[in-house]
Image: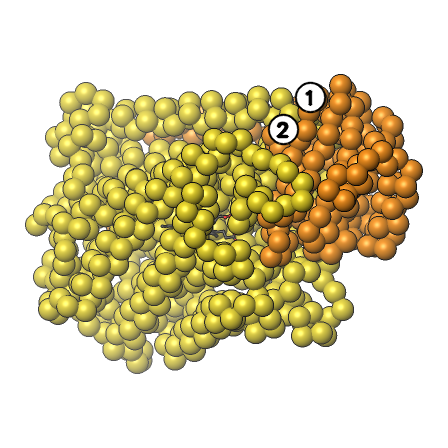
Chain colours: A yellow, B orange
Amino acid sequence: MTAATMPAPGAKAEFRSCPVTGLQVDLAAEKLIKANAVAAVVFLLIGGFFALLLALTRWQAIHLLPADWFYRILTGHGFDMLVAWIVFFEVAGLYFGGAVMLNARLIAPKVAWVAYVLMVVGAVLVNVMTLLGGSDVMFTAYVPLKAHPLWYLGVILFAVGALVAVILFFATIVVAKRENTYGGTVPLVTFGLIAAAIIALYTLLSGAVAFVPAFLWAIGILPKVDPAFYRNVFWSFGHPAQQINLAAMVAIWYALAALTVGANPVNEKLSRWAFVLYILFINLGSAHHLLVDPGPSFAWKATNTSYAMYLAVLGSLIHAFSIPAAVEVAQRRKGFTRGLMEWLWKAPWREPGFSTLVISMSLFGFIGGVTGVVIGTEQINMSAHNTMRLPGHFHATVVSGTTLAFMGLTYYLIPLIFRKELKLKKLASWQPYVFGGGMLLVSVGMIVSGLQGAPRRHWDITFTGAPIDVALPGAVHISLAIMGVGALIAITGGIMYLAVVLASVFTGPTREASRLTLVMSEENPLVEHAVPNLGKEPEGKLTPRGSLTLAFIFLAFFVVYYLSNWWLLGRAWYIR
Amino acid sequence: MLAPQQTWWKPLHRIERSWVLVAFVWCIFLTIMMPIWFFMGRQNVPVTTYRVDAETYQQLVADFVDQYQVDTLSGVPVVEPPPNSDVYLQARQWQWYPVLKLKKGETYRLHISSLDVQHGFSLQPTNLNLQILPGYDYVATLTPTQSGDFALVCNEYCGIAHHLMVSKIIVTE
Ligand code: HEM
Ligand SMILES: [Cu+2]
Ligand SMILES: [Cu+2]
């Protein structure tokens, strides 16, 4: 750990010294982190309630909401979850990684508050306009479906606020560097956040290029917005926005591995390169939302979805090995060296941070990542576009992966940031399993429904009342019911999370954590087990052979699923 | 988790190197599969696109229906065009128009465009899906390889009655 350095003279910020980490915590940054985290959780709560209504409607046997409310709530769910919950949490993360972890002061906290207010006002405006009706356009708002002008304005305010927060993060890092608040290079986690923030910058700018014209069109200044142009710029915003989640999530994986078993990346260089691959290449992946759109050529679609995306995929494959390997080496150092997998069986499975890491990585990789690459393949996209395979894919990435990772991290941040002891620890220990298990069913149920042709964003797949009689295969009802049951379980997991957070923050006695401890034990692996990486290769009994095996099992699954999708496509009608 | 003290700029471990290599080779394979299928595969994403305004397209569809209508289904004309001809399908809130009757094994130039908002062409259970935009005439060279009744579903949200926007493509032997 770095020794605490006092802030440079002249810096006006006030600090408290964190007794756990020895870091100087900027009080202004701390307040902002709290405010953003609370806003994030509030939107997760609203979005989660919406999720319940949606799942109970798409579960055809229950079919809860009427059509207009289904689309209204779907618009709200997409925005509150994908935009509000995720971005508020990420802004909290940026202030944490930028100021607290670097021992630095957050520059211009007043501006940060302005950003916060913009984001809150924007998000509330979107929700109000959505619920009032007349803006049932989905969060994608594809023109020429038209929402109320204030709806677009809400999105724009939110994006501007987020942009300001990202810029502040960079400024904070630059100042920290100049004031020399931390020794050596920036920590890997901050490095990951920097990657996320770089992506965020051009993402949010594209968002402006999409939504500002749409807003001007909605108030009648622009005569029309070209739908193909809109889709292109919208996804230059919408897709890279997911890469922010990805980079942030991976950074959290490293943090959780360090926190729960004292793991250090076996090779920081490799891990950092993997982040660089994200920054450089993942932005072009946005084209994979336009694979079956009229207009672009094969060369444009395939190039943008492949060389760019697959180098980013390479980044993910690198993390997929280096994180388990880090855990394995740390465990082997503790003496769990028997066989290929003793390190894994003897891992702290009751520790929510650890189970979160494993579940988040597995569901993200096996389901989210693999299906993402498959449906992002130019030709295969034809048999997946706008079917339930899409929400199946992204509920595995952004929910089982990112959202679960954010939840797991919270348990460790509450004692540090809110200075409250974590309550309901048993519940916290079970929570990742319940949430992850439910989401597994949700994703698989959706994907299987999609494979049978069930459309996404669709109120009634029995098409009752349509003038022409058509039907989807009956098995679709079974897979949608699996999704529904999974949703109930996942929502239970969500409630468990909220219960732990709210009970800890509002009812727990304020207590200065004296040392960083795990949730389920009194150990502190960061201090007790972290064996400094002395630049030596882990050799002999320490070699991460188990992780390599796991990585190859993963690759085998990937290959099989990928090739079987080509086979499926090969049976379709001929089309060119 | 905190700033690394040692230099992290050290060479890759052997195991890591082999994994990165295998992963890289796999990514190359993912990349070249697309051009391979483009030249060898029989299911490729259509690329032919023309700009068209709604009135012109509606007229093309009306002429097409006049020429080849053979029947009516629930008030919608059923149209049986000859093989190798231009076939026009129109999407609008909330109807596919007209109902198409095609022959198995024959090839058609299927034009699809929307008169109002975006729609989704989703042919089931063969499971082919295309995005349909207003202002763009998307042309697919299509060959049915099975006979029977196929469901045509709209799978892009297009307004309140989106779920009622279904139709059929009838394929005869
Ligand atoms: C308990 C957890 C959740 C359940 C049960 C759930 C369920 C659903 C369902 C049933 C749909 C509708 C799919 C359709 O008809 O097309 C949906 C859409 C969606 N969900 Fe979730 N969801 C959950 C959590 C989340 C979270 C945490 C996020 C983001 C971080 C998220 C992002 C989305 C998005 C972006 C859509 C698509 C909206 C659209 O098509 O416009 N969901 N979800
Ligand atoms: Cu439609
Ligand atoms: Cu529709």
Indicate left or right for A260 with A43 as reference.
left
**What residue sits 13% from the left and 66% below the top?**
A508
Q: Quadrant of the C terminus of chain A?
A: top right
Q: Is residue A250 left or right of residue A301?
A: left
Looking at this view, is A204 or A103 the one in front?
A: A204
Q: Is residue A35 above or below residue B88?
A: below
User: Which residue is pictured at 58% across the width and 60% down the height?
Assistant: A137
Question: The residue marked by circle 2 belongs to what chain?
Answer: B
Kindly identify the amino acid type of the residue bearing the numbered disc 1: Gln
Determine the residue positioned at 19% across, 20% down: A339
Residue A126, x across and y down, in percent: 50, 69
- Does A335 sit above or below residue A204? above
- Chain letter for mark 1, please: B
Element marked by disc 1: loop
Quickly name the residue at label 2.
B126
Rendering coords of residue A277 (x, y %): 49, 43
> Could you confirm whether marks 2 and 1 are on the same chain?
yes
Quadrant assignment for the N terminus of chain A: bottom left
Quadrant of res A68: bottom right
Asked whether A114 or B74 is in front, the reply is: B74
Residue under label 1:
B146
- Rendered image: mark on residue A341: none
- Mark 2 or mark 1: whose residue is earlier in sequence: 2
Res A271 seen here? no
